[in-house]
Image (cartoon, rainbow, N blue to C red):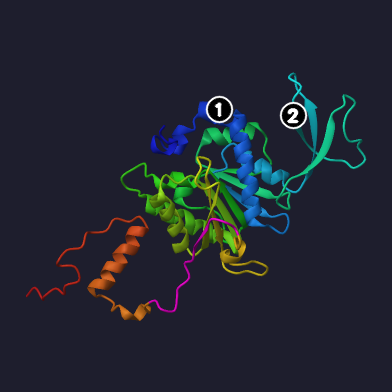
Amino acid sequence: MSRPEDTLAADIHYNDTEARKYTTSSRIQNVQASMTRRALELLDLEGPSFILDIGCGSGLSGEILTRSGTTTKRTRKRNELGEIVDEDDDEEYDDDEPFGSDNGSEGSINEEVGNGPHVWVGMDVSPSMLDVALQRDVEGDLLLADMGQGVPFRAGSFDAAISISAIQWLCNAESSDTSPEGRLSRFFNGLYASLRRGGRAVCQFYPKNDTQRNMIAQAAVRAGFGAGLLEDDPGTKNVKVYLVLTVGSGQGSQDITGVVKGMDGVDIMDGRPSANRKAKGDIKKGSKAWIAKKKEQMERKGKIVKANSKYTGRKRHIAF
């Protein structure tokens, strides 16, 4: 079965029909809610925060952000087959309200994780998805934008950011004048700028292979993030990859090595310069090695550069 990001661009694939089908699927709703709660655990926020939801779609993940930290009543009832099922009332629980009901159902208290509720802004490239979110009257503000073109917010605007099942779309270029590397670079550079110092971001994604996984992680490191990769259910078909990012070391925050310390299956991507690396002054400006390095930097930014040849870096003789 082909992956949707390999067939069409996101804004074309998620048309009106697909957007409504995606939103009304109970399986997708449960998976999205589970991954959003996991992302909030990894963010480890101290209290209500201002969060950017990247690839927010129809607002399924945003609803969890809004509901985060609230206490809800979950009732247990028997269905037609006599099986006990849970029904989430999605209402804030009142201590004065009698727990349970007259029909013999049992009640329990369920508390959402995340130390919220949080205020959030969502951005997505699909107009149909955002239209469904508006019809569902979600709490967050919505923005139609392509994350591959950057994150269009003022520097330091957000305390944190999440992205659920979205950033793998950046690994595909829909036209010849763009590249996956360029789209990833613009996204992570914009995300880094939009987060306050000490802020964090968690991006859940489905990499096609190890090459794509490493390309995404390295793009985040080059943008300046402290980065770590975490796998849930490794070695199974339900494996989920989380890219956990930190910006600097603001007050009360830790480096990514502290955020995911002790978690199983964590692969730390540390982009900080080490002492044994060559100093910048070792490469002479204008030399062949200097030119090759600059070309690599331009290619990573998604720009088109000329190929190296035997004439690269040669001094030109005076014409006359």
Which secondary structure type mostly characterizes the magenta part of the structure? loop
- Going by the picture, which residue comes out furthest to the left? 320
Which residue in the structure is indicated by mark 2?
85
Q: Is residue 291 left or right of residue 271?
A: left
First in sequence, mark 1 or 2: give its number.
Answer: 1
Q: Is residue 135 above or below residue 231?
A: above
Q: Amino acid at mark 1?
A: Lys
Q: CA distance from mark 1 to mark 2?
A: 25 Å
Above or below for 135 versus 214:
above
Is 241 inside the magenta-drawn segment? no
Please provide the residue range marked out in magenta. Answer: 263-277
How many other residues sit within 10 Å of disc 1, few (<14), some (14-19) or many (≥20)? few
Instruction: Name the quadrant of the N terminus.
Output: top left
Q: Which residue matches tag 1?
A: 21
* Residue in the picture at 68% in, 57% down: 45
Q: Quadrant of residue 84?
A: top right
Is residue 268 inside the magenta stretch? yes
- Three-letter code for the amino acid on which mark 2 is drawn: Val
**x%, y% of residue 21?**
55, 27
Q: How many labels, in total?
A: 2
Task: Residue 160 in the image: state x and y as whole percent.
Answer: 62, 56
Q: Residue at x 44, y 51 (%)?
A: 213
Q: Is residue 111 visible?
A: yes
Q: State whether residue 313 is above or below residue 229.
A: below
What is the secondary structure assignment of the residue under circle 1?
Answer: helix
Q: Residue at x 73, y 49 (%)?
A: 117
On residue 75, the disc is none
Marks 1 and 2 close (CB-CB < 8 Å)? no
Quarter placement of the C terminus:
bottom left
